[in-house]
């Protein structure tokens, strides 16, 4: 049986959903997935490739700060998960988290609290995804008239088990949070940073979420559920990431190692998982908050306004009125907003055929999506994709 080698270095975070996505695609092709929890060496790759009859490899690179030497794989096709900038993949296959899209979701969620003051706390160790989240989040907040403070430590901390351990760094963070104008919405670079922010807020006597709303990234339940209060987090679409990686690898293997034309793909945020560190949409009407969470979770899964209205313990007409009073929008407008954002993200970051895009955005057929998108943006799906790709290419040359 053919095998995909899935290299999960022991010092890097393990994401079960990624592996599940890889296995889902592999199982359809009758291919085995073998997880390897060891550090990479050319000798190890060669031995495992021969033993398992490997047709390719997938490697987790999320915490790497330097490029991986892909010559270790020889002629074996390889897909890298979130390689660092400057990585020259041979063949050119990678699947990366769209940190810019995640930052825009974070800005939208925190802006919905009604606060006008915001802050970003970066990862303690310098890395490209934290810098991207910082830049896009702060730009988006300022475009909407808010202020955004950025935490800057005088000296980088030591990192122990992924957490900043130095007293100096912790002290600086507490001072930063103490001096922020309140109420304030804080976007943490990831869940580990979010946990550190919540600890610092507790020591400073800052009330969460009343004085400070805190939002993380990764939806790592081991971290989010041990926080006090529990941490609200953006859940990336890790399962889709795994599926994309497996599809790329199997396509390359079928072509004798030749990389597909679209060999560098991105996956975006899936949903926001609300916990105690942030009120759902910042709404005082708890039923409206539940309805908003339902929309943001299922808008692209065929969600109807009637199902959303059923969240309210009242007539449909009154439910529609309560939702509009709480959010300033109708239920249908909120559903359409999520569908439109999803369509734009998929056009910008994937090569999904236009005729198949409607399946991912909750529309019954491609023609309905085409008409909706043209009405909302004034552009066709194809024109939007071409413009976004051109813009991305220009940014890459700067």
Image (cartoon, rainbow, N blue to C red):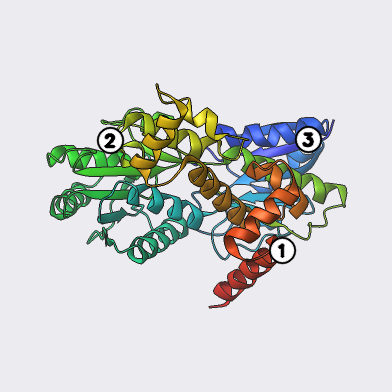
Relative placement, left or right, of 166 versus 131 is: left
Packing grade of label 2 (10 A; few <14, some 14-19, many >=20) is few
Q: Is residue 69 visible?
A: no
Residue 360 position by quadrant: top right
Name the spot of residue 209 as percent of width and height, x first. 24, 38
Mark earlier in primary sequence (3, 2): 3
Q: Residue at x 35, y 32 (%)?
A: 275
Packing grade of label 3 (10 A; few <14, some 14-19, many >=20) is some
Q: Is residue 341 above or below residue 300?
A: below
Q: Is residue 188 visible?
A: yes
Q: Which residue is mark 1?
A: 382
Q: Which residue is mark 3?
A: 3
Residue 18 position by quadrant: top right
In the image, which is nearer the foreground, mark 1 or mark 3? 1
Q: Residue furthest bottom?
A: 398
Check residue 284 in the rendering and tell me which mark sits there, or answer none.
2
Name the spot of residue 343 as percent of width and height, x first. 62, 52
Along the viewing direction, whichever of 139 and 190 lies nearer the viewer: 139
Q: Is residue 305 above or below residue 143?
A: above
Gap in angstroms between the C-alphas marked 3 and 2: 52 Å
Name the spot of residue 232 as percent of width and height, x first. 36, 37
Mark earlier in primary sequence (2, 1): 2
Q: Residue at x 72, y 52 (%)?
A: 352
Along the viewing direction, whichever of 107 and 145 lies nearer the viewer: 145
Check residue 178 in the rendering and tell me which mark sits there, or answer none.
none
Relative placement, left or right, of 59 versus 322 is: right
Q: Check disc 3 and report its element: helix, strand or loop.
A: strand
Name the spot of residue 5 as percent of width and height, x first. 71, 38
Q: Check disc 2 and report its element: helix, strand or loop.
A: loop
């Amino acid at each position: 049986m053919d095998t995909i080698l899935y290299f999960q270095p022991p010092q890097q975070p393990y994401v079960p959903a990624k592996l599940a996505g890889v296995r889902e695609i592999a199982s359809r092709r009758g291919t085995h997935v073998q997880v390897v929890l060891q550090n990479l060496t050319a000798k190890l790759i060669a031995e495992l490739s021969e033993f398992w009859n490997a047709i390719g490899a997938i490697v987790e690179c999320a915490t790497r700060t330097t490029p991986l030497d892909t010559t270790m794989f020889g002629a074996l096709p390889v897909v890298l998960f979130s390689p660092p900038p400057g990585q020259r993949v041979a063949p050119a296959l990678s699947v990366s988290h769209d940190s810019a899209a995640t930052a825009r979701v974070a800005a939208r969620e925190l802006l919905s609290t009604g606060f006008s003051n915001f802050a970003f706390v970066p990862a303690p160790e310098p890395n490209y995804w934290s810098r991207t989240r910082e830049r896009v989040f702060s730009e988006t907040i300022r475009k909407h008239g808010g202020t955004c403070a950025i935490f800057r430590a005088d000296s980088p901390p030591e990192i122990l088990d992924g957490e900043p351990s130095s007293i100096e760094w912790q002290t600086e963070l507490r001072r930063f949070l103490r001096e922020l104008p309140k109420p304030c919405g804080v976007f943490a670079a990831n869940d580990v940073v979010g946990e550190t922010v919540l600890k610092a807020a507790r020591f400073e006597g800052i009330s969460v979420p009343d004085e400070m709303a805190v939002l993380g990234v990764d939806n790592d339940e081991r971290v989010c559920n041990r926080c006090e209060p529990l941490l609200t987090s953006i859940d990336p679409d890790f399962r889709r990431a795994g599926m994309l990686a497996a599809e790329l690898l199997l396509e390359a293997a079928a072509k004798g190692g030749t990389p597909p034309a679209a060999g560098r793909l991105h996956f975006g945020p899936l949903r926001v998982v609300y916990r105690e560190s942030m009120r759902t949409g910042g709404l005082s009407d708890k039923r409206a908050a539940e309805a908003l969470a339902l929309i943001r979770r299922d808008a692209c899964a065929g969600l109807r306004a009637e199902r959303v209205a059923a969240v309210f313990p009242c007539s449909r007409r009154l439910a529609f009125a309560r939702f509009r009073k709480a959010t300033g929008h109708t239920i249908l407008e909120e559903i359409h907003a999520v569908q439109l954002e999803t369509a734009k993200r998929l056009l910008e970051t994937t090569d999904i055929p236009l005729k198949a895009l409607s399946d991912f955005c909750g529309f019954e057929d491609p023609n309905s999506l085409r008409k909706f998108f043209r009405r909302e943006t004034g552009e066709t799906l194809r024109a939007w994709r071409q413009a976004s790709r051109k813009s991305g290419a220009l940014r890459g040359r700067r």
